[in-house]
Amino acid sequence: MFALEFPPLSHIVDWPGLAGEGAWWEINKVVLVYAIAAFLTIMIFVLGSRRKELVPTGAQNLAEITVEFVEDGIARETMGEAGVKYTPMLISLFLFIFFTNIFEVIPIFQMPASARIALPLVLALFAYVVYHGAGFRAHGLGYIKHALVPPGVPFLLLFLVVPIEFVSKFLVQPFSHTVRLFANLLAGHILLVTFAVLTSGLFVLKPYLPLALLPMAGVVVFTAFEVFVSFLQAYVFTLLTGVYINAAQSHEH
Amino acid sequence: MRTFRLLLAALLVSLVAVVGSASAASASGESEATCLAEIASEEHFDPEHLTEDQDKAITACFQAPNPMVPEKNEVIWGAFGFFVVFGAIAKFGYPQIKKAMNERTERIRTDLETADNQKAEAERLAAEYQTKLADAKNESARIVEEARQTADGVRRQLEAKAQADIAEMRTQAAADIEAAKSQAMADLRGEVTALAIGAAEQVVQRNLNDDTNRALVEAYIQQVGASN
Amino acid sequence: MSALVLAEISDKGIAALTYGLGAIGPGIGIGYLVGQSVQAMARQPEAAGMVRTTMFLGIAFVEALALIGFVVFFLGQ
């Protein structure tokens, strides 16, 4: 058997600092990706709103498609007309996550910033505060009852249902919201790294050289797949934010 | 505006929470070199004969931090990046694009409305012209009809007058002829009488009682006239 | 240990095996979910948009189970 030098999983996503090693403002590859993602997101809107034409082209078209997609496909779909005011937040979430994700397949970078737990955690906590805030605003203190006590449950069952609802709404929900984005991207990244390491390993070992074509095809196919995953996870994260806000502020249970 | 403030507050709260939770974890994030140097500076350190604890410590130096633990710098920069994006989009980007889209919708709707109005106007005008055209046609037909009727009347009148004239002339002529005939007859009769008398005088050579002669001739002429 | 060991029984091997077992449930769940959604879309193409959104939501919820297994692997490291 041949031995492949496979890096420990935690090393795959660990990047040395480019500047300020160890400092609170340490800049590494992930931070660089954040900066570029933020820049790209803002640039779409800056270029999009610079020249207003009747028939949109280029950046304006892109910005308008995004706005329409998020407003109709996510905000209205999950929250109805009441959700339109959350559109700017959902657009920023969607675009920022998408751009940080898509760096998974962009050469040189090849690192989804969301494969580090920091960004998903920040965004999920942001969403957590937003949807519980929306709930408290819609129901006042009655929101706690609204969230924990489903209607039409017999009194004795409440002793079982309320703790379950509490755990699922206040603890598991933000956790799964974070982990869904983070783990999907980390898994995709590990997948790509595995195929790439396998390809290079087989390439070095002369007798196995033809076999290297298989993992190479895998890299190509999964790179395409990861583009789709990048989009889908940004969409799902945003969609779930909308669903949670709707669940918190809806008046029918 | 209230929503915006709520979202701003949400961002700050989540930032504080994450940084707070991350600060404890990032203490282990020192570089490999300093980690190794620390171990090497320990007492009883012999590269050839490592104790079990030292071996573990060296392995730990090469161990990257667990990916489940958020890094403080990434949390800060990530939150900062998202905050900038969110602020820019909520304050400028989204309203701008939305305004452009609404303006376009409005403009297209106005254009369509104008086009509709103009179409309706054109249709109305066309209908009006049609009516007018039909009216004119009717009018002309009426005028022609009237003229024809007038002409007909005139013709009939003239015809009748001509007929009447002809009839009158015919009657007149007939009367004239009749009168001329009776005149001629009367003249002829007188003539014939005179001739006959003259002839008889010539023939008889005898002066008969003129009255008797005359009566005879008259009787004869009557006879001749009756047989004629 | 011979040179031909393919899968070493170690903590890591067991963790990977357990994750594989844990992925069976979500695998079945997502397969069933998407299959039913496709059926629904085929029967009522006019409701396809709604079904698709709900399908992605369902996938996200089911997938979370598999991902939690993935994360537990890292937590246990």
Image (cartoon, coloured by chain):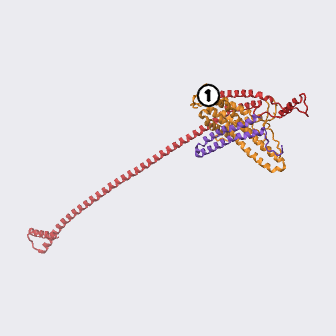
Chain colours: A orange, B red, C purple
| Chain letter for the residue marked with disc 1 in the picture | A
Q: Residue furthest front?
A: C1
Could you tell me residue B203's position as x and y percent? 13, 75
Could you tell me residue B227's position as x and y percent? 15, 71
Q: Residues within 10 Å of mark 1 (few under 14, many from 20)?
A: few
* Circle 1: residue type: Phe
Q: Residue furthest top?
A: A141
Q: Label 1 belongs to which residue? A: A159
- From the viewer's perspective, is residue A3 above or below residue A238? below
Measuring 34% from the left and 55% from the top, which residue is drawn there?
B155
Could you tell me residue B93's position as x and y percent? 67, 34
Q: Quadrant of residue A245?
A: top right
Using the image as rendered, state which of residue A113 and residue C66 is in the foreground: C66
Measuring 61% from the left and 34% from the top, which residue is drawn there?
A79
Using the image as rendered, state which of residue B66 and residue A21 is in the foreground: B66
Could you tell me residue B193's position as x and y percent? 15, 68
Judge whether residue C75 can be spotted in this image: yes
Give the side of residue B129 with respect to residue C71, left or right: left
Q: Quadrant of residue B201?
A: bottom left
Using the image as rendered, state which of residue B181 and residue A211 is in the foreground: A211
